[in-house]
C-alpha cells in the first residue's frame, strides 16, 4: 500500500474499480442482460468480479453498480452481494480483508432481496441509491450504536487516528469503530490509524 499527502496528512492510495453488473452480464451470460434471476447467473457475475479482484493490488475499493439491473432475485442477491462480503469476513481470497465494497445504483425493487440475504447471513453493507447525490447508507444487520458510530464517521468522512478518542470518548464506541473496520464497513489506515468512511474514498474516484 502506498500513501501520499501534504504536511503529514497521509491518505490511503487504494486501487478502485467500478463494476457495471449489466456489462458483466453481457460478457458472461448469453441472454437476459438486465435480469439477475437465477443462481447460475448471479454466480457468473460474482466470478467475473472476483477475476477482476485478482488482477489488482490490495487494498482496493470495488463499486458495484446495480442501476441497470431491472430484475434481481434472492439467489442472485446471495451470490452478488452476500458471498462477496462473506469472503471478506472469512479473510479468504479474493478479498482477504483488504477489498471493500459499496453497492451503488440501488432501486426500490433491489432492496428487499438484498436486505433478506444480508439479514440471513448477519451481514451489513454500504449502499447508495440511484443518483450520485443520494446519501450513502448502512444496510443489513447492525446495532443502534453501530448505526450511530457509522453515521458519525460518514458525516465527517475521515477522522485522524489521534482524534478518535475525542470523537468517541466512550470505550464502547471505540470498540464499535474496531468492529466496523473488521466488517469492512469503514477503512482504517494501517499506518496512522485514521478512519475513513468508504464514501469518502469513493468520492476521490468520481
Image (spheres, grey):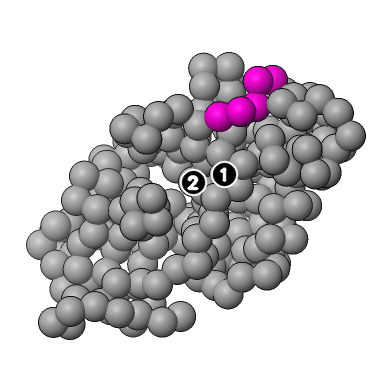
What residue do we see at 29% from left, 63% from top?
195
The boundaries of the magenta stretch are: 67-71
| Nearer the observer, 2 or 126 | 2
Instruction: Please say whether residue 107 is one of the residues in the magenta stretch.
Output: no
Q: Secondary structure at mark 1?
A: strand
What residue do we see at 45% from left, 27% from top?
130
Q: Secondary structure at mark 2?
A: strand
Q: Position of residue 204 (x, y in %)?
A: 34, 57
Main SS, magenta residues? loop
What mark, if any, has residue 64 been given in the picture? 1
Q: Are marks 2 and 1 in contact (CB under 8 Å)?
A: yes
Q: Position of residue 4 (x, y in %)?
A: 30, 79
Determine whether, in the image, residue 156 is placed left or right of residue 178: left
Find disc 2 in the rendering and name its residue. 102
| Nearer the observer, 112 or 106 | 106
What residue do we see at 62% from left, 41% from top?
20
Q: Position of residue 124 (x, y in %)?
A: 50, 41
Q: Is residue 153 visible?
A: yes
The tag earlier along the polypeptide, 2 or 1, is 1
Q: Dot 1, crowdedness within 10 Å: few (<14), some or many (≥20)?
A: many
Determine whether, in the image, residue 179 is placed left or right of residue 27: left
Give the farthest residue toward the left.
166
Is 125 drawn above or below residue 35 in the view shown? below
Amino acid at each position: 500500500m502506498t500513501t501520499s499527502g501534504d504536511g503529514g496528512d497521509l491518505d490511503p492510495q487504494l486501487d478502485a474499480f467500478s463494476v457495471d453488473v449489466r456489462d458483466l452480464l453481457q460478457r458472461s451470460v448469453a441472454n437476459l442482460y438486465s435480469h439477475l434471476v437465477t443462481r447460475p447467473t448471479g454466480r457468473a457475475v460474482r466470478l467475473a468480479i472476483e477475476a477482476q479482484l485478482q488482477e489488482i493490488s490490495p487494498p482496493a475499493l470495488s463499486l458495484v453498480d446495480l442501476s441497470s439491473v431491472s430484475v434481481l432475485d434472492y439467489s442472485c442477491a446471495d451470490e452478488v452481494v452476500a458471498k462477496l462480503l462473506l469472503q471478506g469476513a472469512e479473510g479468504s481470497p479474493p478479498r482477504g480483508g483488504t477489498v471493500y465494497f459499496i453497492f451503488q445504483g440501488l432501486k426500490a425493487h433491489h432492496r428487499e432481496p438484498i436486505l433478506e440475504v444480508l439479514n440471513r447471513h448477519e451481514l451489513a453493507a454500504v449502499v447508495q441509491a440511484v443518483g450520485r447525490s443520494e446519501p450513502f447508507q448502512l444496510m443489513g444487520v447492525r446495532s443502534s450504536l453501530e448505526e450511530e458510530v457509522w453515521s458519525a464517521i460518514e458525516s465527517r468522512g475521515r477522522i485522524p487516528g489521534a482524534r478518535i478518542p475525542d470523537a468517541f470518548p466512550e470505550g464502547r464506541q471505540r470498540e464499535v469503530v474496531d468492529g466496523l473496520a473488521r466488517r469492512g464497513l469503514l477503512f482504517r489506515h494501517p499506518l496512522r490509524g485514521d478512519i475513513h468512511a468508504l464514501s469518502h474514498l469513493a468520492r476521490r474516484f468520481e
